[in-house]
Amino acid sequence: MPSMTTDQVLKELADLEDPKILAVNRKHGDDHAVNLTTLRAVAKRLKTQHDLAVELWATDDSAARLLALLICRPKAFTPDELDAMLRQTRTPKVHDWLVSYVVKKSPHAEELRTAWLADSAPEVAAAGWALTTERVEKRPEGLDLEGLLSTIESEMSAAPERLQWAMNHCLAQIGISHAEQRARAIGVGERLGVLRDYPTPPNCTSPYAPVWIAEIVRRREEQG
């Protein structure tokens, strides 16, 4: 299809805005008003357009940024560019998509993971923990799982919400993926009690790590 300008894309996104979607998203700290399935359809039509993605990101509009993350070339960003983008994120969904769809595909992911883990900004550290969780599950070689559990045990309770969630996910993934660390991971979760009373809808798994670990391990064992 003919390429679109940034202004044309912004106009299309504005036309797709739905106040009801915005109201729901605001409850989760997000501020985009475009249905994500519709947004993905726009991205599929536009295909990869890295220069356009960079321009859309620069608008600071959340829907435009989400679209940018779908049409960019993850490997085209430098470490400094990705670090700056992370620090510019204002909402959970943009943060999640940046880490999941772009940084995880970057050749600089490990360099950024180690730098972000040690960062004093909670949102940045949360990204470091998200990348660590990915490694715990898929590429654990070289990771100090005992050290990660010790850090989680000493820091997770007092961590700000977003960082706490990321650390809790890592705790659960260690227990799920590494049987030799499972008892300790469950013990850490029980001692800290983080998210123990989190309201969980029916048919959903609790984010409380001991329950989360037990449930996923049970499912995997049933599947053989």
Image (spheres, helix red, strand yellow):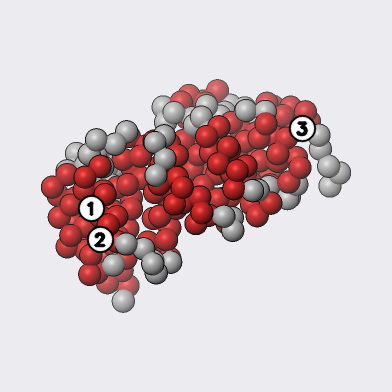
* Local crowd size for mark 2, using a 10 Å CA cut-off: few (<14), some (14–19), many (≥20): few
Q: Quadrant of residue 18?
A: top right
Q: CA distance from mark 3 to mark 2?
A: 48 Å
Closer to us: 163 or 176:
163
**Residue tagged by mark 2?**
146
224 shown above or below 142:
below
- x, y (%) of residue 17? 62, 27
**Residue tagged by mark 3?**
6
Q: Residue at x 33, y 42 (%)?
A: 165
Q: Residue at x 29, y 55 (%)?
A: 148
- Count the marks: 3
Which amino acid, by three-letter code, is at mark 2? Glu
- x, y (%) of residue 152? 26, 48
39 shown above or below 60:
below
Tags 1 and 2 touching, CB below 8 Å: yes
Closer to us: 5 or 21:
5
**Residue tagged by mark 1?**
150
The residue at the far bottom in this view is: 224
Which amino acid, by three-letter code, is at mark 1? Ser
Which amino acid, by three-letter code, is at mark 3? Thr
Q: Residue at x 83, y 42 (%)?
A: 3
